[in-house]
């Protein structure tokens, strides 16, 4: 079954982190500082998604202005992946940007995914949304990469007022 961008469901929309689902994909869109408290939102969204789908693809998108997560947030994210690991098809992390900063983000993501947790699910840090969407198709046969990219574009254009959070 192919997904349309209209299948995008936003769980939390804030100026720092947006959590959404798209079919069997859990999307974490990091726009600002990553706080340990965002993991509670990921847990809730994951629980709802896992109730409908036996396997879930996690897609993390990091914007250029998002600083690396602090130690507390890194530990909270690692704990999240440990808890949900058996239901993950894969974890994909990408960064919107280029150069040194993009390399740093890939390094931090690799540390969290490969050194801080022991899990059997595939983990990939990729260079672009296109690459992430194509790789997601490998782990989820029902995923339409073009529709996922359209949904990610829609998500990127959603902006709450600074400091406001919208939960749905």
Image (tube, rainbow, N blue to C red):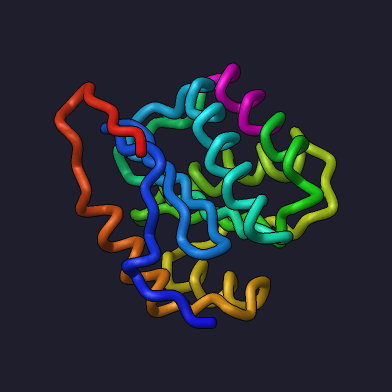
User: x%, y% of residue 136?
Assistant: 58, 70
* Residue 30 drawn above or below residue 133: above
Nearest the eye: 97 or 151: 151
State yes or no: residue 40 in magenta: no
The structure residue drawn at horizontal position 34% and vertical position 46%, both measured from the top left corner, is 63
The furthest residue to the front: 52
Q: Magenta span covers which residues?
A: 70-78
User: x%, y% of residue 61?
Assistant: 44, 51
Picture quadrant of residue 53: bottom right
Nearest the eye: 52 or 88: 52
The structure residue drawn at horizontal position 36% and vertical position 56%, both measured from the top left corner, is 98
**Residue 124 appearing in the image:** no
Quadrant containing the N terminus is bottom right
Nearest the eye: 119 or 150: 150
Horizontal relation, residue 75 to residue 35: left or right: right
The structure residue drawn at horizontal position 46% and vertical position 45%, both measured from the top left corner, is 28
**Residue 10 appearing in the image:** yes
State yes or no: residue 74 in magenta: yes
The furthest residue to the top: 72
* Residue 3 drawn above or below residue 164: below
Quadrant containing the C terminus is top left
User: x%, y% of residue 50?
Assistant: 66, 51
Count up the numbered dots.
0
Horizontal relation, residue 126 to residue 155: left or right: right
* Residue 145 drawn above or below residue 95: below
User: x%, y% of residue 154?
Assistant: 26, 60
Nearest the eye: 57 or 105: 57
Horizontal relation, residue 121 to residue 56: left or right: right
* Residue 99 drawn above or below residue 42: below
Task: Considering the whole magenta stretch, tell me its main secondary structure.
Answer: helix
């Amino acid at each position: 079954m192919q997904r349309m961008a209209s299948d995008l469901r936003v769980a939390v929309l804030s100026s720092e982190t947006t959590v959404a689902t798209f079919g069997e994909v859990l999307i974490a869109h990091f726009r600002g500082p990553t706080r340990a408290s965002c993991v509670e939102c990921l847990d809730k969204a994951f629980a709802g998604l896992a109730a409908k789908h036996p396997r879930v693809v996690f897609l993390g998108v990091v914007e250029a202005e998002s600083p690396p997560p602090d130690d507390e947030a890194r530990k909270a994210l690692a704990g999240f992946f440990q808890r949900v690991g058996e239901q993950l098809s894969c974890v994909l992390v990408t960064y919107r940007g280029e150069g040194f900063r993009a390399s740093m983000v890939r390094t931090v993501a690799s540390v969290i995914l490969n050194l801080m947790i022991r899990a059997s699910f595939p983990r990939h840090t990729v260079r672009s949304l296109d690459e992430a969407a194509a790789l997601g198709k490998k782990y989820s046969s029902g995923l339409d990469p073009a529709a996922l990219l359209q949904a990610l574009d829609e998500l990127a254009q959603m902006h709450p007022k600074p400091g406001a959070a919208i939960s749905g």
